[in-house]
Amino acid sequence: MTIQFTRQQRLLSPAQFSRVFAEQAVRSVDGSLTLLAAPNDLGYPRLGLAIAKKQLRLAVDRNRCKRVIRESFRHNAAELPGLDIVVLARSELVHTDKRQLHDKLARHWRRLNKRWQQAQ
């Protein structure tokens, strides 16, 4: 069984990203990642990636991080409420291996879920 990351699960337009940044978003922050989440009316979570070249200089590093973030999201999307989530990276992320990044993201997904439930 493959878990897909469909077009419906992505933030695609600048307006969708702007809405997350403009609203009072629920935040989850650590030394290398910031996750912002705002409610949507769809009933399922969507993911947007804002991995800046200024933070991760090499394309291979940016692509590796995006790939791992999407994979983690696919595996955890069923437990997340209807949120639009934007992931921002910091330069420290380049020193994180795949396993550490998966662990960090798992903590972020749990934290977002918990904070979202407390905000309700």
Image: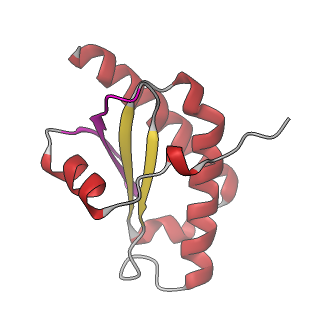
Specify whether residue 39 is painted magenta: yes
Q: Position of residue 115 (x, y in %)?
A: 30, 24
Q: Return the residue nearer the eye: 7 or 100.
A: 7
Find residue 113 and report its image quarter: top left
Q: Residue at x 47, y 27 (%)?
A: 110
- Residue 71 visible at all: yes
User: Left or right: 102 with respect to 87?
Assistant: right
Could you tell me which quadrant the N terminus lies in? top right
Residue 100, above or below 57: above
The majority secondary structure of the magenta stretch comes to strand
Q: Position of residue 44 (x, y in %)?
A: 47, 29
Q: Residue at x 47, y 34 (%)?
A: 109
User: Left or right: 41 with respect to 51?
Assistant: left
Residue 107, above or below 101: above
Residue 19, above or below 24: below
Specify whether residue 43 is painted magenta: no
Could you tell me which quadrant the C terminus lies in? top left
- Residue 96 visible at all: no
Q: Residue furthest right?
A: 1
Q: Residue at x 29, y 56 (%)?
A: 17
Q: Position of residue 2 (x, y in %)?
A: 81, 40
Q: Which residues are magenta?
A: 25-42
Q: Residue at x 22, y 18 (%)?
A: 119
Q: Position of residue 56 (x, y in %)?
A: 46, 78
